[in-house]
Image: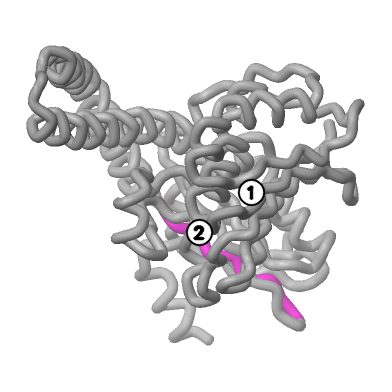
Amino acid sequence: MSFLKEFLNQVEEGYLLIDRQGLVLFCNDFLIRRGLIKENYENRPYYECIGNLSVVSCLAETFSNGKAKVCNFYHGHRDYSLYTFVGSDMVVVRCTDITELKRYERSKREFVANVSHELKTPIAVLKSILETLYEEEDREEKKTFLERAIRRVEDMRNLVEDLLIITKLESGEERLKRETFSLRSLVEDVFDFLSEEAQMRDVSLENLVEEGFMLSGDKDKLFLLLKNLVDNGIKYNRKGGKVRVGSFMQEGHAVIEVEDTGIGIPKEHIPFIFDRFYRVDPSRSKELGGTGLGLSIAKHIALSHGGRVDVESSEGRGSTFRVYLPIL
């Protein structure tokens, strides 16, 4: 044990051992140097030794439910991540300094946001020039070329807009404008917005949400979430297919269900579909004009409401996305 203690005192991570009665058995030097725990800690309750309320709260939850937990906290101008592991006779706590990682992520978000913002104006100007040339052009061959160029510029514009949206969502700095509204009406607004695309692809849209089903949340962001899910269902559907939106209550959550009769998602791809720029079929996605950010945006909007998005899918039989939003 003395060798283990000596080793743990050399590492640049914090380690804490607590017995099942909540008494501190061991703490390495890292936690003492950072002011996270008092020096005279041995055989004292953890809540008397630890100098950060977020850590105490995290450990209290671990002891209460007997489950491992991960939480992030701020202390002494540094960011930390805390992991608790529950054993048969003790709880092991690992604490990692993630300040540099947070700084890097912040810099990356700021870079993407700045570049995206700077690109908006030149893309708009380029699109305007191409549209003017298209209107003035009489030769069909050149009009076809200009049409293709306009579509590509539109794809670039959509990508820039989506990058700005997801950067704001990931930063956690976007505040929700909560209001209570009818989900059925919101779905109708989404269907109106996407009706032209649905008609073009011969996909019918069905609103199965009952009258009087109310939601509390940021209406504009939830519109965007639903738009992305329904748009996905339209694009990856078959001719004559359907996209249905329904809802129900389940264990303190309002659940929005978006079901399509499309091509489905291969099982091996499902764990990754909410990742940025992940495409199941890159060539098909490019042909359909997606940015690769729609599902990631949907996931982050659900998370910002304290909810989540799940998916069930069978290749060749369609997909069902479920959005779980806590009832406040």
Is 83 contained in the magenta span? no
Q: Is residue 150 left or right of residue 205?
A: left
Q: Which residue corresponds to the image point at 31% horizontal and 51% vertical from the top-left?
A: 287
Q: Is residue 197 above or below residue 1?
A: above
Q: Is residue 124 left or right of residue 168?
A: left
Magenta residue span: 89-97
Image spot of residue 48 (x, y percent): 72, 49
Q: Is residue 183 above or below residue 313?
A: above
Of residues 88 and 262, the one drawn nearer to the viewer in this rendering: 262
Which amino acid, mark 2? Cys
| Label 1 SS | helix
Image spot of residue 78 (x, y percent): 41, 40
Q: Quadrant of the C terminus?
A: top right
Which residue is identified by label 1? 55
Q: Decide whether the magenta segment is chiefly helix, strand or loop.
A: strand
Is 96 contained in the magenta span? yes
- Per the rendering, the mark at residue 95 is 2
Q: Are marks 2 and 1 in contact (CB under 8 Å)?
A: yes
Which amino acid, mark 1? Val
Q: Is residue 184 left or right of residue 49?
A: right
Q: Is residue 324 visible?
A: no
Image spot of residue 30 (x, y percent): 43, 58
Q: Residue furthest front?
A: 139
